[in-house]
Structures are given as structure tokens and as C-alpha cells.
Amino acid sequence: MKFNRHIFILLLLPLLFSCRSETEKPSAEVSAEGRTIPVEYASGFRIVDYGDYQLLTVENPWPGSEKAFRYLLYEEGASIPEGIAADARIRVPVERIVVTSTTHIPSLEALGVEKSLVGFPGLQYISSENTRKRISEGKVQELGENEAINTEILLSLDPDLVVAFAVDGSNRTLSTISKSGIPVVYNSDWTEDSPLGKAEWIKFFGAFFQKNEEAAAYFQEVEEAYLEARELAKQAKEIPTVLAGSMFKDQWFLPTGKSWHGQFFKDANARYLYEDTEGGGSLALSFEAVLAKAKAADFWIGPAQFKSYEEMRAASPHYAEFSAFQDKQIYTFSSEKGETGGVLFYEMAPNRPDLVLKDLISIFHPELLPDYETTFYKPLQ
């Protein structure tokens, strides 16, 4: 996923979905019609297992979509009743796959199926050392731009499946690929507001590789680590105030209180100064409005792509008016990159919200995690 696409998805796009409760534990529903795979936090997909085939439904392929997509995943020799409507039929386990977002890479690696990846648009944005090694060996091919995938190269790779994402339904390239006979499946993990909701999409990938149990076990480990960290944060004696985001042209973009980032601040036991704002996306405010509200904030998290205080001051000397700037309490996720420039946070953070939360706890409450080495967030230089 490219830088501008990340900014659009993570900061600018107002999302339409709310997160699920993190306290209710669903159980698998079993009936003559199949067994529903438990999905606790994610709101965008569901899976029903019928034994030798499964039905995977993506409820909200993009914000504002009025259409859900249903995919039939079947084993070789499966007995499939007549009349089942599906947008695509895919034989599993998948052996050759193309994905289109760096957020998909960690799921493949966690399931041990990274060798199935044969193509990706924008290879330079992949940070994973394992996948970069396969790229250097020529085992993963460049497919160009996500909005205009090189279909000639893609068809030559003969993948069993293309996992795509879309901000709307207008990508003609995906339609062309689908008409060629290669199934295209939408993944909308990026529309989830809950940190655990994003991470639970590993179950989506597990279905294509007949690794439902492995996906569930991996997610359970992440969930337990996240909830344990959240409980730890409650022991903090002081609750710091937090500012986020930065200026783009003449507006300051920052996450809403109900967004993915906003939930992290809350779970890290910090008071995000915009915690009461609604919506799952971002706010666009004037510099003056942010300065009036957040000038004295204790911490400033995620100032876009800035890597140093000098860069920030050069972009706008007014940044220096904030206490967090003066006290050197600004932390960025943009400094941790792969060998070709891909930002680790964009790729890995959605799958490992437990590590993101621990980073923030160590920043806000260092006494709770002494000597902890952060994974994503680093002090601005």
C-alpha cells in the first residue's frame, strides 16, 4: 500500500462502521445449514462452514457499499447443493495468491503460507524481511499500481485468487481480472474501527488455506496479549493528555475518538483530547482550533511523516508553540521502515494491535513497562 493511500485510508476517509463490543464472547452457531465460525470483533465478514465447503461473506467491501459479496470456498470433490449463489467459487486450499495491500502480508506469514504469494502491486512498500527475501529471489512479481494492475503480468502468474481492497466499486482493473476467470475477493479489514477487529481478519485468510483453527489460535494469542496490556494500563496513577496528527495544506487532520487510533489511546489509559468526537475516520480542523485545545497536551503521537523536530519547524514554525514540541514528547511511527522504504507500522500494526498498545503504554506510563523496547513508535529525532 502506498504512502498516499495509507494517509487516505487511515486519516482522511470517514468510515461508516462501528466496532463491536470487546466483552461479549460469541459461540459457534451450529445448525443443519452449517456452523458459523466465531467472529467476535470484526464487523465486515462472516464464515459458515458446511464441511467440505464454506461460504464467506464480506458485508461491507467499502464504505457506503450497498452490496455484500459472497464467496464459495470448496474442497476438491466437495458435494455442493445446487442453487447456491456466489460472486466467486474458489477451490481451497489456495496455492497461488496475489494480494494488494501490505496489511495482507502478515496474515500470510502468520499462517505459514507466505510462499503462496506470487504477485503484488508496489513491491517497494513491503517491509517484511521474509517476503523481501522472496522478492529478491524473483518469486514475487511486481504488478505495477494497485489502481491499474498490470493484467498481462498477473494473468501470466496464473494465481488461484486475487485479494483486493477498494475505496469504492469503480476499479475497472479488478473487473477485467474477474472476467478473465481469476476470482477477485474483496478484503475490507481497513474499514474496521476496533484494533482487535482489524486483527481478526486473519480468519478471513485462514478460510482460503483451510487453516481456520490456526487463524483462530493466532488471533486468540493476539487478543489475550492486547487485553492483558489494557488491564495493565489501568494501573497507571496519572492519565496524560494526548494530541495526534498534523497539518496538511491548511487543515489539521487527526483521528476521531471512535477511530482505530482513538481506541488505542483510550485503552492505553490516556486522555485523547478529541476522545468525544464521533465517527470512525478523521477530523479536519484549523490550526488555530487545535492550538487552542491542545497547546498544553502532554504527548503528541503520530505527526504524519515527519522524522525530526527540524522538519516540523521547517514545515511550520507554529508547531513549536505546543508543549509536546517544546518538551520533546512527540513520537512517530514513520521512522521504522523496511529496506526499500516501506513503513513497518502500515504493514504490521493492524495484525499486531497488542504491540501498538504496549508501545503507547510504555510511552504514556513508562513505569508500567520498564526497559520495554517499542516496535513501532519511536521518539521524534
Image (cartoon, helix red, strand yellow):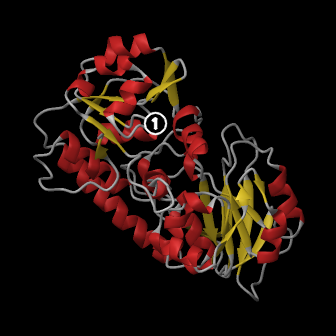
Residue 185 in the figure: left or right of residue 346: right
Q: Position of residue 112 (x, y in %)?
A: 49, 79
Residue at horizontal 30 percent and vertical 40 percent from the top: 380
Residue at horizontal 70 percent and vertical 48 percent from the top: 166
Q: Residues within 10 Å of mark 1 (few under 14, many from 20)?
A: many
Q: Nearer the viewer, residue 155 or 187?
A: 155
Q: Is residue 275 visible?
A: no
Q: Position of residue 292 (x, y in %)?
A: 34, 11
The kind of residue tagged 1 is Ser
Q: Nearer the viewer, residue 86 or 314?
A: 314
Residue 130 in the figure: left or right of residue 116: left
- Quadrant of res 31: bottom right
Q: Which residue is mark 1?
A: 259
Q: Judging from the image, what secondary structure is the residue with disc 1 in?
A: loop
Residue 278 in the figure: left or right of residue 124: left
Vertical relation: 287 (above or below) 133: above
- Quadrant of res 178: bottom right
